[in-house]
Amino acid sequence: MIKRNIFKNIGPLDHRYSLRDEFKDYSTYLSEEAKVKYQATVELALVKALAKRGICSQEVATQVEKAVKEITPEEVYKEERKTKHNIRALVNCIQHKVSEEAKPYIHFTTTSFDIVDTANSLRYKEATEELILPTLKELEKLLMEIALREKETVQVGRTHGQHAVPITFGFAIAEYVSRLGNTIQDIEESSKQLKGKIAGAVGAYNASHLFFDQPESFEADVLAELDLEASTHSTQIVEPEYITNFVHYLTSCFGVIANFSDDMRHLQRSEIGEVGEYFDEDQVGSSTMPHKRNPINYENVKSMWKEFMPRMMTVYQDQISEHQRDLTNSASSRFIPEIIVGLLSSVNRLIRVGEKLVVDHDNMKKNFAQNKELVVAEPLYILLASYGHPDAHEVVRKLTLEAEETGQTLRKLVQTKEELKPYWEQFNQKQRELLVNPEKYIGISVDKTEKIVKSWSNKLDIELTG
């Protein structure tokens, strides 16, 4: 067993972001040890299918199953130093642990990437089911709870960085409930589409056809042991679009949480101060300014996204393989687990931060109050137009300029303009109330928030407390 001080590792995922307990869960599916384990599991599935067809005995399958349980990455890597071939090294290590009778049936009729691609599909599929989806749904549930809690908290809307018409903070969070929910569904569906292959060196079943009249049926038997289906067409590799689509949706999900983090980061600006990260008693925000409380967690998520999002370009490039296969994806595809770990690390960070999210309701009211009187420009213009004013937008635009110059409110100015009084008199009580109380001009923010949360709670089978 190789033991290494984590601070001698090169990759920051392994020394900076591996110090939390959840990293042990990542390694179950995404480590080099896991990769070897899953490849050995595919070799075992092959022998089990052979035994079921009477090509080898059940005793052979039992021996191989025992050997596979004993395989370690250390011995495989040691063997690879001799073979200069990772799958041949794995096969040799399994063969070293079984009888002479069993040895011929290990890796029988297969090529290396029957094992590699099938093992990757299997581990990414299981990682999705057991790790990725539960973690994402935990964040989704947290966002749902925040959205419902703050569904009536009035917040000024912002477009282009400028104050717009009001919404509620819960409505703002509901945006991310929906966007994250969509990507969760996409990840789940694309993971179910991950395929395997037992089709041989060029995908034409040349070797297996020597023994089976219907080699595709044999392939299906092997993959059924792993709860996988075969790629529609294979060369030496599985069609790359399955894994490309899967990683694409992971990357898209990363973009959603990066956008959320960016929004939360900006809302923590000193001049805005509408939300805040909980700071521990001994936490330091700046090495030189003791008063600072930097939004480090949200900034970290965006920083991680900046690192891993561009790697999607490499995955797209790995779609290209000359003729029946070249080796140009053999190194680059090994980094896909890092994309998954980067995403999960960021999602877990947001869960920890979100559980202690501080909403400053006073600052939200103060920020809204800055331009609350100008907010009525939109409903005023629309109401004037609805009652027949021929140029309502231009009239209200000029009124806003006058309001800014004189300090008068729009609703007061409207009532002083003789040409506008007839329109004002036609407004009903509800319409006038919106102009007097701009904080009520939030549309269906509350209802929409509830609707979004309920919909995604049902779609994703997330049970909310309270």
Image (cartoon, rainbow, N blue to C red):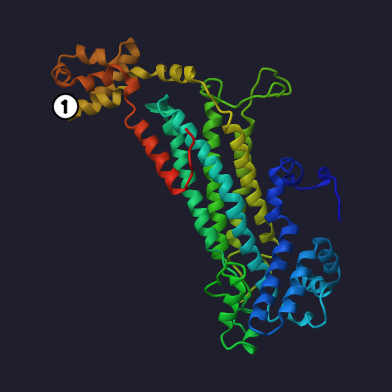
The image quadrant where one finds the N terminus is bottom right
Query: Could you tell me residue 450's position as x and y percent?
Result: 39, 36
Determine if residue 90 is in view.
yes
Task: Identify the secondary structure beneath mark 1.
Answer: loop
Query: Could you tell me residue 111's position as x and y percent?
Result: 69, 76
Pick the front one: 265 or 53: 53
Query: For mark 1, does the 10 Å Cα neighbourhood hold few (<14), some (14 to 19), or many (20 or more) residues?
Result: some
Amino acid beneath label 1: His
Question: Total marks drawn?
Answer: 1
Determine if residue 201 is in view.
no
Circle 1 residue? 389
Vertical order, 121 against 59 (above or below) = above
Please give the name of the residue rendered at 59% of the width and 83% of the height, measured from the top-left corner. Answer: 215
Report which quarter residue 434 is drawn in: top left
Vertical order, 112 against 406 (above or below) = below
Residue at the far front: name it. 59
Report which quarter residue 42 is drawn in: bottom right
Please give the name of the residue rendered at 74% of the width and 78% of the height, measured from the top-left corner. Answer: 59
